[in-house]
Image (cartoon, rainbow, N blue to C red):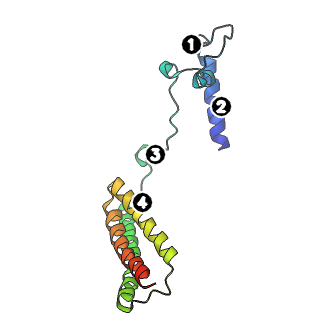
């Protein structure tokens, strides 16, 4: 955080040093502030962007950094196995709840929170068009919906 502040301060000082006062919206005598906070602080306004390039605060993506991903196939396999395991782990619970109709040992608040979280993951996956996330979240949500419905019905 401190490093980011130092970089910003250095960038602002460079802009102020290399930009004449008349181009910053100030007269050579110092003149009154323009009323535009960004212009007064940064030394240039939006329409004067040709004076200094804006700072891009976004993190560079993987392609821009040229950092090779070690064995992308292995990472995809790990993700797929994780999705399958975390999805099917609820199958035995759903089967037991349906067969026995006994939900006394299950926490309603925990299962509701987990189901809501899975629903949000489903929305996130749909927004990113990430099919493995969509499918695993949809199946998990269906299993959890059965468990929550049985808990609500049978207490």
Foreground: 155 or 90? 155
Residue 3 figure quarter: top right
| Crowd band around label 2 with a 10 angstrom C-alpha radius: few (<14), some (14–19), many (20+) | few
Kindly check if marks 2 and 3 are in contact, taking CB atoms under 8 A apart as contact. no
> Which mark sits nearer the N-terminus, 1 or 4?
1
Label 1, label 4: how far apart the Cα atoms are = 49 Å
Label 1, label 3: how far apart the Cα atoms are = 35 Å
> Which mark sits nearer the N-terminus, 2 or 3?
2
| Crowd band around label 1 with a 10 angstrom C-alpha radius: few (<14), some (14–19), many (20+) | some
Residue identifier under label 1 = 23
Pinpoint residue 22: horizontal percent, then vertical percent. Answer: 59, 10
Mark in front: 1 vs 3: 1
Foreground: 106 or 2? 106
Is residue 71 among what the camera can see? no
Foreground: 35 or 22? 35
Where is 37 relative to 128, above or below? above
Name the side, left or right, on which 27 lies relative to 79. right
Rendered residue at 62%/33% (across/down): 8
Pinpoint residue 103: horizontal percent, then vertical percent. Answer: 45, 86
Label 2, label 3: how far apart the Cα atoms are = 25 Å
Mark in front: 4 vs 2: 2
Q: In the rendered image, which quarter contains the N terminus? A: top right
Say which mark, if any, is on residue 65. 3
| Crowd band around label 4 with a 10 angstrom C-alpha radius: few (<14), some (14–19), many (20+) | few
Kindly check if marks 1 and 4 are in contact, taking CB atoms under 8 A apart as contact. no
Pinpoint residue 24: horizontal percent, then vertical percent. Answer: 58, 16
> Which mark sits nearer the N-terminus, 1 or 2?
2
Residue identifier under label 2 = 9
Label 3, label 4: how far apart the Cα atoms are = 14 Å
Q: Secondary structure at mark 2?
A: helix
Label 1, label 2: how far apart the Cα atoms are = 20 Å
Say which mark, if any, is on residue 70. 4
């Amino acid at each position: 955080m401190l490093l980011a502040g130092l970089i910003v301060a250095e960038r602002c000082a460079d802009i102020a040093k290399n930009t004449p006062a008349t181009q910053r919206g100030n007269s050579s005598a110092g003149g009154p502030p323009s009323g535009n906070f960004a212009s007064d602080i940064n030394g240039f306004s939006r329409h004067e962007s040709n004076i200094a390039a804006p700072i891009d605060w976004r993190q560079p993506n993987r392609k821009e950094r040229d950092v090779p991903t070690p064995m992308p196939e292995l990472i995809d396999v790990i993700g797929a196995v994780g999705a399958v395991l975390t999805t099917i782990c609820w199958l035995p619970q759903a089967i037991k709840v349906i067969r026995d109709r006994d939900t006394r040992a299950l926490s309603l608040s925990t299962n509701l929170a987990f189901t809501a979280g899975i629903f949000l993951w489903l929305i996130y996956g749909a927004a990113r068009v990430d099919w493995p996330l969509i499918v695993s979240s949809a199946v998990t949500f269906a299993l959890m919906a059965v468990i929550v419905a049985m808990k609500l019905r049978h207490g």
